[in-house]
Amino acid sequence: MSDAPVQPRLAPLPFDWLLLLVLLVLPAAGAVMVYSASAIQAARQLGDEFFFLERQAVAFTLGLALLLLALRVGYRRLAAWAYPLLVFSLLMLVLVLVPGIGRVAGGARRWINLGLLNFQPAELAKVALVLYLAHSLSRKREKVRLFSIGFLPHLLVTGLMVVLCLLERDMGTGVIMLLVLFTMLFAAGARVSYLVGAVLLAIPVGWRLVTGTPYRMERWLAYLDPWGHRDGAGFQLVESLLGIGNGGWLGQGLGQGKGKLFYLPAAHTDFIAAVIAEETGLLGIAVLLLLYGVLVWRGLRASLRAAEPFGAYLALGLTTLIGAQALLNLAVVFGLLPTKGLTLPFVSYGGSSLMTLLLAAGVLLSVSGDRGGFLRPGVQAVRVAPPRGAPEASP
């Protein structure tokens, strides 16, 4: 028998270090690109080239504090906040529609001016919806296949949020909420027939919302033929595609892009990926996609390894929220979907988006520390020797 001392095993980290690394790299890269995309505009229009970068830095600092707080508190304690946060988010979504309170920009009423930053209630509402769904589905998992218990209440709550977002002229956020809902219901075991039926009913409603609203119809036509609408609704998409084409394989170099020189609207917000493509090329976009791919991978891994249903559904919902929003934003920038007002998660300029996503990241990191495996099939025990005292099998 060896007398060598037994080396103690290192305790596993209380969170996924690779996920944390990605969640820090994305905002850092975003800060660089926000400055590159906004410096000239800020200098000429506001007299301070660092205006947007400084505000983004403040939002990142506050968001990082929220991330650490969520990680310190732990996701299990958040279950008690599911309904209060849901009610607060609904009230804020209603409040932003009140004239004199909600701030209008680009024809949409989505923001409440808090002085240091403009708060967008829809950003918090997305996280609140995931928290509510995770809490409710974990409690009702034995009855989730029942229409009146597992499907209808969640659809009504989500539908109410979507309607309020549509009143703000924010169809993109409504689409994200519905994607999160259906993903979480499917994972929880809701009947596929209910999900398919809801999608089939939603298609004509969505088409009516597009064709019945002039500005949405213009965007749809511009999506089908951007060059034919270059002087109108297709201008932003055309400039985005020109910038992407100008980037080539390796890009024009940081700060050397031309689209941000008052050609590309929303260069530092919704269309920041076009600036990234022009200045860093296909290589930069590939790295960006890789980072989001790792984030989704580790988020789904955290969901599969969660020790209890609440954590599993929470990680799945937050991962779907971030991944779907990133995918839709990039699809719009590359002309694969009609234009929508969605930020690129952790990268675009936007204090509300960055803070709430960092809060969600802290919750996701908290779940990643679990070592259970609620969503994975349990390991079957294997008997390798007969119990002591049992008769041995005859040869």
Image (tube, rainbow, N blue to C red):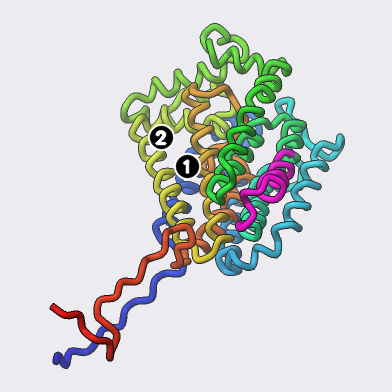
Residue picked out by circle 2:
254
Q: Write the residue at 56% across / 40% down.
A: 192
Q: Residue at x 66, y 22 (%)?
A: 204
> Measured along the vertical axis of the image, is residue 285 above or below residue 311?
above
Q: Which residues are magenta?
A: 141-159
Give the quadrant of the C terminus.
bottom left
Mark 1 or mark 2: which comes first in sequence?
1
Q: Position of residue 302 (x, y in %)?
A: 46, 58
| Residue receiving disc 1 | 32
Q: Is residue 50 visible?
A: no
Asked if residue 335 shows in the view, the reply is: yes
Residue 97 in the magenta stretch? The answer is no
Q: CA distance from mark 1 to mark 2?
A: 9 Å
Classify 24 as above or below 204.
Answer: below
* Crowd class of label 1 (few under 14; some 14 to 19; many from 20; radius 10 Å): some
Q: Which quadrant of the view contains residue 126? A: top right
- Residue at image location 51% in from the left, 42% down from the top: 347
Q: Residues within 10 Å of mark 2 (few under 14, many from 20)?
A: some
